[in-house]
Amino acid sequence: MVLLETLGNIVKLIASVGGLYLVALLYAQHRQPAWVDTLRARRIHVLWLLVLTSLSIKIVEDVVTGDSGTIDRALLIFLRAHLAGAQPIFEAVTLSGSAEVLTPLTLGTCLALALSRRRQEAALVGTSVISAAVLVYVVKLVVGRQRPALWETARYWGASFPSGHTLVVAAFSMSMALALSGMKPAARTALLTIASLWTVLVAISRLVLGVHWPTDVLVAALAGTAIPLGISLLMTHALQVKAQRP
């Protein structure tokens, strides 16, 4: 039954994403013709953005309604039981996603890109990280989910949902991957792999430390990845429109 339900959900997701893309394309053709070329040229980009957004909305719904509670607890206990011995390693990993590390890293990256005359790439990274930080702050205040209290943990600012470390790392690493792959297309796969690996490790570290529920980090990873994808799409469209002007 679980397998059938999972397959059904996957089919629904594929159908909904495909439908949303077609609706967006038809709307653009009739109302926003300037968007048609962008939607077609960046089709895979747009579809991934729709997938990430749809999954995020579904998980947020489960969190708000409390449907994810049982699975969250079971997964957290399982990970803690099997990875608790590696906690010192994950403490170092989680530090890489802290504001103390990401703030100077983001500022330094944006400055280096700007000085290299890569202003669009600098804007992508900076805007993505700022947007991610604002989203974390707003959602934490709105949802107000309690952090896990299954064992003694370090104290962190704010509510549990979403994971700020995971969301901002995902936004920074994905925006960097997109920026650098535009400069070196041959390295695109390697850059996206590194970005994904960093995000996954930080997400797991938050669970091993016991300061977030699994759905906290899952939504954070999805939303953090979607933010630079969306911003990159808007930037690409703006450049195409500018190039078409006489």
Image (cartoon, rainbow, N blue to C red):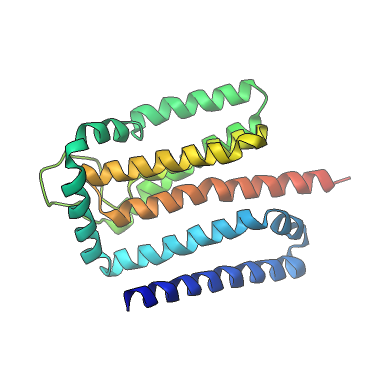
Q: Classify residue 24 by image quadrant.
A: bottom right
Depth check, front residue: 131 or 91: 91
Residue at x 59%, y 60% (from the top left corner): 47
Q: Is residue 239 left or right of residue 220?
A: right
Q: Is residue 71 left or right of residue 58?
A: left
Residue at x 38%, y 50% (from the top left corner): 220
Indicate the position of residue 169 as horizontal and vertical percent values: 41, 39
- Reply above or below: 164 against 51: above
- The answer to whether any part of residue 30 appears in the image is yes
Q: Quadrant of the N terminus?
A: bottom left
Q: Classify residue 206 by image quadrant.
A: top left
Indicate the position of residue 239 as horizontal and vertical percent values: 74, 43
Indicate the position of residue 105 as horizontal and vertical percent values: 45, 26
Residue at x 57%, y 41% (from the top left corner): 189
- The answer to whether any part of residue 165 appears in the image is no
Q: Is residue 111 left or right of residue 62?
A: right
For the image shown, how many numbered marks are present on the structure? Answer: 0
Q: Classify residue 43 by image quadrant.
A: bottom right
Residue at x 32%, y 47% (from the top left corner): 163
Q: Quadrant of the C terminus?
A: top right
Indicate the position of residue 223 as horizontal and vertical percent values: 45, 52
Query: Which residue in the rendered view is the most extreme toward the right?
Result: 246
- Reply above or below: 168 against 72: above
Q: Is residue 168 left or right of residue 68?
A: right
- Reply above or below: 172 against 147: above
